[in-house]
Amino acid sequence: MLKSKFCKTFEDYAKNVFLPYIDNQLKTCSRVDVVWDEYRADSLKASTRGKRGKGIRRRVQADSAILGNWESFLRIDDNKTELFTYLAEQLSTY
């Protein structure tokens, strides 16, 4: 996962980290496939993720602030699902 670096909002993250990364990849190829993970509640990985501890739930919207602890944010499956949906929407309009 691309780190949030110094981004303050999810819009900043999409515009300053994610989309430039995709754009850079397109300089050396003609096609980029973006594939997201699916987080199933009944999987073996779900129990492993549960043992790592709880993170902080944050709604992913363009103007929502990104927390300083990116790894804690990514511990919550709903956060990742919303983040991936938001980034897919940003990519489709890029």
Image (cartoon, rainbow, N blue to C red):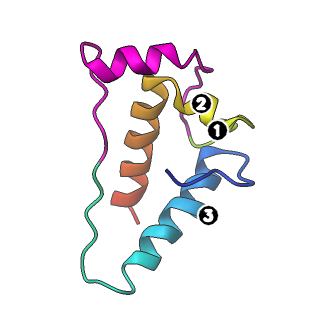
The amino acid marked with disc number 2 is Phe
> How many C-alpha atoms fall within 10 Å of the one at disc 2: few (<14), some, or many (≥20)?
some
Near mark 1 (Cα within 10 A), the count class, few <14, some 14-19 or many ≥20, is: some
SS state under label 2: helix
Q: Which mark is residue 52?
A: none
Question: CB of mark 1 within 8 Å of CB of mark 2?
Answer: yes
Q: State which mark lies toward you, 2 or 3.
A: 2
Residues in magenta, as a range? 36-61
Dot 3: element: helix
Q: Tell me residue 60's x, y (percent).
A: 53, 34
> In percent of the image, x 49 and y 14: which residue is there?
51
Q: Specify the quadrant of the image occupied by residue 93.
A: bottom left
Return the residue at label 1: 70
Q: Nearer the viewer, mark 3 or mark 1?
A: 1
Taking the spot 25% from the left edge, 83% from the top edge, the residue there is 30
Q: Disc 3 versus disc 1: distance between alpha carbons?
A: 16 Å
Q: Nearer the viewer, residue 21 or 53?
A: 53
Residue 41: percent from left, percent from top:
29, 15
> Which residue position is annotated with label 2?
73
Element at label 1:
helix
Residue ID for mark 3? 16
Q: Quadrant of the C terminus?
A: bottom left
User: What is the x, y in percent for residue 77?
Assistant: 43, 25
Residues under labels 2 and 3: Cα distance?
Answer: 19 Å
Query: What count of labels does the image hold?
Result: 3
The answer to the question of whether label 2 and label 3 lie on touching residues, with beta carbons closer than 8 A, is no
Q: Residue furthest bottom?
A: 28
Q: Main secondary structure of the magenta part?
A: loop
Name the residue type under label 1.
Answer: Trp
Query: Of label 2 and label 3, which has the lower sequence position?
Result: 3
